[in-house]
Image (cartoon, rainbow, N blue to C red):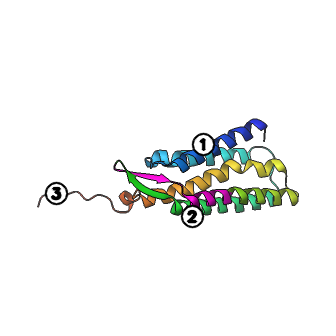
Amino acid sequence: MTFANVLVYVALIGYVLFKRVQGQPVATPKRLFALPIILIVLGYGDLTHGGTMQPIEITLTVTGATLALGLGLLRGRADKLSVRDGSPFVQWGAMSLILFIGNIVAKLVLDLIGVAAGGGTSAVGKSLLLTFGLTLLGEAAVVWMRTGGATGLLNPPQTSEPR
């Protein structure tokens, strides 16, 4: 991981934090899921590019990914939802922020365990984009469902035909 990568990752995390704490209208499903999916694809590519991963690195990456997705799902439940100008609006409260910080701490702890167990420092750092994407995906899925986004899939609109 280069210094430029670290700067990009820190800037991306800072941007997401700023936007979520400030609050924003809930985007269309395409926009809601775009960033998480892009990050997951880039993170997977970053993770699989290069040498073979050791079993401890694979185990900790899967553990971190599962934890990130789960914490994202919890954060989606903790997000404050309201209606502004007739549209759903989402904003992070204290619990959302705590869950996000907990996610970062968990990632750092897993990375330290990986290095202490003999894993390479480059392999543990490469999973950052993947886990960040997964936590945002979990949050987006819950926010989408909480705002009724899944209603169209679960209950398709009925056509009213005169009898």
Looking at the rendering, the stretch of residues picked out in magenta corresponds to 86-103
| Occupied quadrant, residue 158 | bottom left
Locate the C terminus by quadrant. bottom left
Q: Residues within 10 Å of mark 2 (few under 14, many from 20)?
A: some
Mark 2 or 1: the one toward you:
1
| Number of the label disc, if any, that sits on residue 161 | 3
The CA distance from mark 2 to mark 1 is 21 Å
| Occupied quadrant, residue 56 | bottom right
In the depicted structure, whether residue 68 falls above or below residue 27: below
Residue 67, percent across and down? 66, 62
Mark 3 or 2: the one toward you:
2
Q: Earlier in the sequence, mark 1 or mark 3?
A: 1
Q: Find numbered disc 2 in the image and state the secondary structure of the residue it sits on.
A: helix
Q: Is residue 116 left or right of residue 2?
A: right
- In this view, the residue in front, 87 or 116, is 87
Q: Which residue is mark 2?
A: 74
Q: Residues within 10 Å of mark 1 (few under 14, many from 20)?
A: few
Q: Amino acid at mark 1?
A: Tyr
The CA distance from mark 1 to mark 3 is 48 Å
Q: Find numbered disc 3 in the image and state the secondary structure of the residue it sits on.
A: loop
In the depicted structure, whether residue 87 falls above or below residue 68: above
- In this view, the residue in front, 65 or 90, is 90
| Number of the label disc, if any, that sits on residue 15 | 1
| Number of the label disc, if any, that sits on residue 148 | none
Q: Earlier in the sequence, mark 3 or mark 2?
A: 2
The CA distance from mark 3 to mark 2 is 42 Å
